[in-house]
Amino acid sequence: MVDAEAIYRQLTPGSRAIHEQAVRVMPGGTTRTTTYFDPYPLYITRGEGCRIWDADGIERIDMLGNYTAMILGHAHPKVVEAIRKQAALGTGFAAANPVEVQLAELLCERVPSLEAVRFCNSGTEATMFAMRLARAFTGRPKIARIEGGYHGTHDYAEVSTHPDVDRAGPPDAPIAQADSIGTPSWALEQTVVLPFNNPDAAEAIIRREAGGLAAVILEPIIGAGGVIAATPAYLERLRSVTAELSILLIFDEVISLRVAPGGAQELYGVMPDLTTLGKIIGGGLPVAAFGGRADVMELLDPRRKPNLAQGGTYNGNPLGMAAGLAAMTELTPDVYQDLNRKGARVCEQLTEVLATHGVRAQVNGVGSLFAIHFTDQPVVDYRTKASSDQKVTHE
């Protein structure tokens, strides 16, 4: 039996030394829970294209791309040049800047549901503001979300992203569970959990809770949860019932914007009321956005009284806007088609290799997103994903 940990330790003394230094000033030696793994994480010193180099100078192919954000690869020349030019002009002002207008126009042109947009700094902020906006617009307190979806790390988002299935209730009527210590009880009380890809059960829950529901939020393609695509019938049912009951439908496209110029909503032909964006729209810098119907977004207009206040020192910061504009300009329809062809080919080859070696696994893929689940049954929701061999996946 190969001792993988021993090999890892032998190859990465530089990362180990940095980790020993880091744990003295940062819990776990890192600022992101997701970048930690035993016995210590890799510390990356540079990236170029699809490759990264660690603290020991080992070159690696980057299959994660900073959790899908680096769609053009690392240090793309056009993005680097845009950052360089803007940095020479200034990196932040207590004022609006023209580059944010240009990026806003580009996004509104591409994403079908965007009539107006606001910028922030992370997907967490984008979903937080979208939920708050929905509550302000409808006057209702509750948010419905799908079991197994990921919407960041604010209080309303830290519910039933990765619940314990033994305590999560029946598949067609999930029970809200906190994902983290410190999640307040009111977040559970104000969150309604829906089963994914079960339109009848989801509709029944929405109708039962309709009097208090401000919005239904979901990833049309679950990203971090394993690239699990919604069925067209599921999204169409959610759109129909929410429209009937005057409940806002929010698509979290922080990850799925990379599957088409207009995101998953373009692929499915289903129009949400609000959309959240992030990852690729910042060109590798911390940029996110939320937007949608003009009559809903109007609540953010400071000329309106009362209005929903949205602050943030770095919202729409010129460096992020310049990087994002450069990256999104490079992402033409032809580039998307090429990426999606490559993604489909990777999925085909992975499926062939796994079958050849008798490995029980499912390869889920949409466009340039893919994930492997070590199970012999199709993965269509959180419960079927939970049936996969998590030890193989993580160890």
Image (cartoon, rainbow, N blue to C red):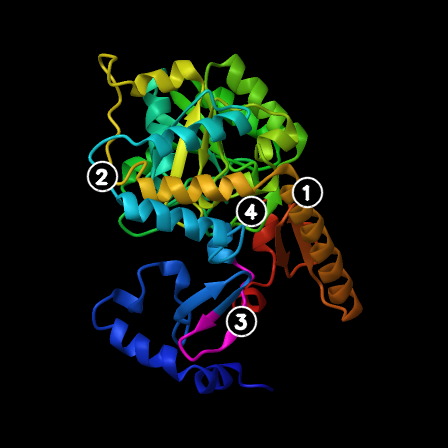
Residue 136 in which image quadrant: top left
Using the image, tell me which numbered label, if any, was put on residue 382.
Answer: 4
Is residue 261 shown left or right of residue 359? left
- Mark 2 or mark 3: which comes first in sequence? 3
Circles 1, 3 touching at the beta carbon (< 8 Å): no
- The residue that label 2 is drawn on is 313
How many angstroms separate mark 4 from mark 2 (CA)?
37 Å
Q: Position of residue 27 (x, y in %)?
A: 26, 65
Front residue of 332 and 256: 332
Using the image, tell me which numbered label, if any, was put on residue 337.
Answer: 1
How many angstroms separate mark 1 from mark 3 (CA)?
26 Å
Q: Would you say residue 266 is visible in this rendering?
A: yes
Image height check: is 211 above or below 394? above
How many angstroms separate mark 2 from mark 3 (CA)?
36 Å
Which residue is painted at 76% across and 69% down in the image?
358
- Mark 3 or mark 4: which comes first in sequence? 3
Q: Position of residue 294 (x, y in %)?
A: 42, 16
Front residue of 98 and 388: 98
In front of the other: label 4 or label 1? 1
SS class, disc 4: helix
The span picked out in magenta is: 53-64
- The residue that label 3 is drawn on is 60
Work out which quarter of the rendered image holds the N terminus and state it.
bottom right
- Mark 1 or mark 3: which comes first in sequence? 3
